[in-house]
């Protein structure tokens, strides 16, 4: 509603050719309080005045000479400044009223003037006029606001599209009511390989969800329609490649709280999933063979035990160890060792049935877990299958490598009901298989436990043995076959184990090697041999050469040669009285490092012989390269040398080969005269064995030397003589 003051503030123009009328009206209006009243008696200037002053009300006399009121209204309309012409016509002729209204007048005043009527009509018209102006202003404001908002909306939509088009994630907006796509960005096509358009049914994008994930994703969507959700599933692209995606869903609610749209943002997480999968795989698998590692295998065993417990099944655990794998590694090198392990692993896998699990526990140790329904023979069946698969020798880097294995089997629930004990039982069984000569399998029995216990007792006792002075060296002579002279003695270690008597090295050297104790104990043997050489010299027995057995671990020790040199110095012995016996595999181990160490020993004046020759991977070029002085043919070839033509011809070939390389040949384990005669006949240089003497303590061996001197010709017609080293 326009206020009174605003109405009185309205601009009014009085148009009448009669100045008296004009005056009268002006006076009437001014008295009534109107502030802006102007007038004209010339109708021709009305238009111009209105354009200049924008009157809120024009009081127009219809009947004027020249230009009448109708024409003025026409002219005002034409000027078109205002769609709303606020004209009040003044007329004395009622017949003109209707025409005037049709011509655009808003009301009329009768002549002669009735003051109340005139003021009321003017007041009302001004009020209407002002209301009209006000509403126009409002409409304008409204229009401006709408325009601003529209521009803002357009801008924000542009921003949304810009954003949605440039994010790497695919994005759709789903119309909940119609289940159609309200919006889809270009990344969807890149991600899915599918194009989708606005208005397409949502099924057109959902149908590429991987069949294995489809059900739960659909279920999830139904369960939480329009809720915030976050899921990972797979998509199958039209080219059949599979992508892992992470989809985040959230609703867009309208002001009344309904949810007309749901947004889905889909990120390709295939690479992350793959990296995660690889990490998980690496954590549970052995890098060399890609088999489950110890951790994963134990998990599988744990699960198998649980299932067996639940469904009354049997579980067998097989611990598998490759026999003498160290030899392969040492003689053919680590790359070949690795290749063998990989090939072996793949054979193992082929021997298994679905559900069986094989893993690598470390080194050359593998394990198999078998779950069987009927009985506990599943493990034995698998062991037999694996052994059969090894009938075909492995081919490693062009070399044929026969592989045998030792297997220990333990069964749940018969042997143990719990994982750790089951493994311990299988381990004890494997130890038994090894002790039984390898290349076999053993099933756990209760007695084995006692033996396994004993093994750990032996290890405990060995740790203390050196400190307690329980080791002692025995000596066994070697004889020059031609002359019958005793050329040297071999130092052989014994363990005086309290309560067990004299223990053979065959029973504890492997344990010392395994425990790493062979290094200090071996050093003790060299030191003791040096002391013995100097003692025999001091007590008048003369220069007796001693051969000491040296294990590969010792040779590989840093500064081995310099330690030996200081022992030699300390005891003041002639290094040419010292000989080291090393096995073939030691020679092949760590090629260059061994070569350097042996070179240093040779430079000191120590001679080197190859022990147990024929049992390893003989490589003649190595013998030449390492400047070896002698070969000792292993007892295995000597034992039946007179009865087994194969052994005989191998021994003969070895003797000839050694001689062609200018190496001395010693035969080990000579027990009979026939053997000695055979060796003599084929030119073998030296013999060692019970025929001459068993290994004896130092005191007894010196006694023997004296007896030998007294019984010259014991072994042949010529007298045996003291050996004097050709220093
Ligand atoms: P090896 O060096 O080949 O020693 C020869 C083995 O054959 C010795 O067994 C010896 O007693 C045995 N022997 C000798 N003559 C005969 C025979 O006529 N018939 C039979 N059946 N056997 C015979 P031993 O003393 O039990 O030593 C076994 C192995 O222990 C040795 O084999 C050697 O490899 C290792 N060993 C001994 N002492 C040491 C040592 O101080 N250090 C290292 N690293 N190894 C040692
Ligand atoms: Mg030896
Ligand atoms: Mg030997």
Image (tube, rainbow, N blue to C red):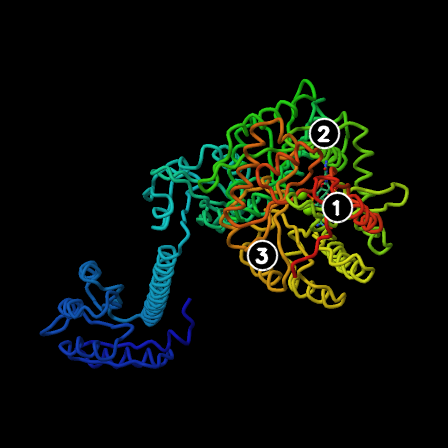
Q: Residues within 10 Å of mark 3 (few under 14, many from 20)?
A: some
What label sits on residue 410 in the rendered view? 2
Q: CA distance from mark 2 to mark 3?
A: 41 Å
Q: Is residue 253 visible?
A: no
Element type where label 3 sits in the image: helix
In the picture, residue 572 is in which quadrant? Answer: bottom right
Q: Residues within 10 Å of mark 1 (few under 14, many from 20)?
A: many
Q: x and y percent of residue 653 in the render?
A: 53, 38
671 shown above or below 156: above
Please tell me which of labels 3 and 1 falls first in the chain. Answer: 1
Q: CA distance from mark 3 to mark 1?
A: 27 Å
The residue depicted at 18 percent of the width and 76 percent of the height is 46
Q: x and y percent of residue 589 in the render?
A: 58, 51
Closer to viewer: mark 2 or mark 1: 1
Q: Which residue is mark 1?
A: 476
The residue depicted at 60 percent of the width and 45 percent of the height is 665
């Amino acid at each position: 509603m326009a206020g009174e003051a605003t109405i009185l503030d309205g601009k009014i123009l009085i148009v009448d050719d009669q100045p008296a009328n004009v005056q009268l009206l002006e006076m009437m209006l001014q008295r009534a309080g109107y502030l802006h009243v102007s007038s004209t008696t010339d109708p021709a200037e009305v238009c111009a005045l209105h354009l200049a002053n924008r009157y809120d009300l024009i009081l127009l006399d219809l009947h004027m000479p020249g230009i009448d009121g109708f024409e003025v209204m026409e002219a005002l309309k034409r000027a078109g400044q205002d769609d709303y012409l606020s004209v009040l016509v003044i007329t004395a002729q009622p017949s003109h009223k209707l025409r005037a209204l049709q011509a655009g007048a808003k009301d009329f005043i009768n002549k002669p003037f009735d003051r109340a009527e005139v003021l009321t009509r003017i007041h009302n018209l001004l009020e209407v006029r002002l209301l009209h102006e006000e509403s126009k202003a409002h409409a304008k404001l409204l229009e401006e606001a709408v325009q601003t908002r529209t521009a803002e909306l357009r801008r924000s939509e542009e921003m949304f599209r810009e954003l949605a088009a440039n994010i790497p994630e695919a994005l759709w907006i789903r119309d909940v009511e119609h289940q159609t796509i309200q919006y889809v960005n270009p990344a969807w096509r890149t991600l899915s390989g599918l194009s989708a358009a606005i208005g397409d049914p949502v099924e057109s994008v959902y149908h590429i969800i991987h069949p294995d994930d489809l059900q739960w994703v659909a279920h999830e969507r139904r369960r939480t329609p329009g809720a915030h959700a976050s899921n990972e599933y797979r998509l199958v692209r039209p080219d059949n490649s599979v992508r892992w995606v992470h989809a985040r869903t959230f609703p867009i609610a309208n002001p009344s709280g309904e949810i007309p749209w749901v947004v889905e943002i889909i990120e390709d997480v295939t690479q992350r999933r793959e990296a995660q999968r690889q990490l998980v795989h690496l954590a549970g698998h052995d890098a060399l063979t890609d088999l489950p590692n110890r951790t994963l295998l134990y998990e599988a065993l744990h699960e198998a035990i649980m299932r067996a417990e639940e469904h009354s099944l049997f579980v067998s655990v097989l611990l598998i160890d490759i026999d003498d794998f160290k030899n392969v590694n040492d003689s053919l090198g680590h790359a070949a060792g690795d290749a063998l392990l990989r090939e072996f692993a793949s054979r193992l896998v082929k021997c298994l049935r679905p559900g069986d699990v094989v893993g690598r526990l470390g080194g050359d140790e593998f394990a198999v877990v078998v779950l069987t329904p009927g009985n506990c023979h599943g493990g034995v069946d698998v062991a037999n299958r694996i052994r059969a698969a090894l009938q075909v020798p492995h081919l490693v880097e062009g070399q044929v490598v026969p592989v045998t294995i030792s297997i220990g089997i333990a069964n749940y629930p018969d042997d143990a009901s719990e994982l750790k004990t089951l493994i311990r039982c299988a381990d004890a069984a494997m130890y038994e298989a090894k002790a039984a000569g390898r290349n076999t399998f053993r099933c756990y029995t209760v007695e084995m436990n006692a033996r396994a216990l004993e093994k750990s007792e032996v290890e405990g006792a060995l740790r203390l043995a050196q400190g307690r002075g329980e080791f002692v060296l025995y000596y066994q002579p070697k004889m020059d076959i031609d002359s019958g002279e005793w050329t040297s003695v071999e130092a052989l270690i014994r363990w005086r184990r309290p309560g067990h008597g004299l223990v053979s090295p065959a029973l504890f050297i492997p344990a010392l090697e395994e425990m790493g104790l062979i290094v200090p104990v071996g050093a003790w043997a060299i030191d003791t041999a040096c002391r013995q050489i100097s003692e025999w010299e001091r007590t008048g027995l003369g220069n007796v050469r001693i051969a000491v057995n040296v294990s590969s671990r010792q040779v590989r020790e840093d500064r081995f040669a310099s330690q030996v040199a200081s022992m030699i110095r300390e005891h003041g012995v002639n290094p040419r009285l010292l000989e080291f016996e090393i096995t073939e595999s030691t020679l092949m181990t760590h090629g260059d490092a061994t070569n350097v160490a042996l070179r240093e020993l040779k430079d000191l004046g120590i001679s080197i012989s190859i022990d147990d020759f024929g049992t390893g991977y003989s490589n003649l070029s190595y013998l030449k390269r390492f400047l070896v002085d002698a070969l000792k043919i292993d007892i295995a070839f000597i034992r039946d040398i007179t009865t087994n033509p194969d052994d005989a011809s191998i021994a003969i070939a070895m003797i000839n080969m050694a001689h062609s390389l200018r190496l001395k040949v010693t035969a080990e384990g000579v027990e009979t005269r026939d053997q000695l005669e055979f060796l003599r006949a084929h030119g073998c240089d030296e013999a060692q064995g019970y025929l001459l003497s068993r290994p004896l303590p130092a005191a007894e061996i010196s006694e023997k030397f004296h007896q030998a001197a007294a019984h010259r010709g014991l072994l042949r017609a010529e007298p045996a003589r003291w050996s004097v080293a050709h220093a």
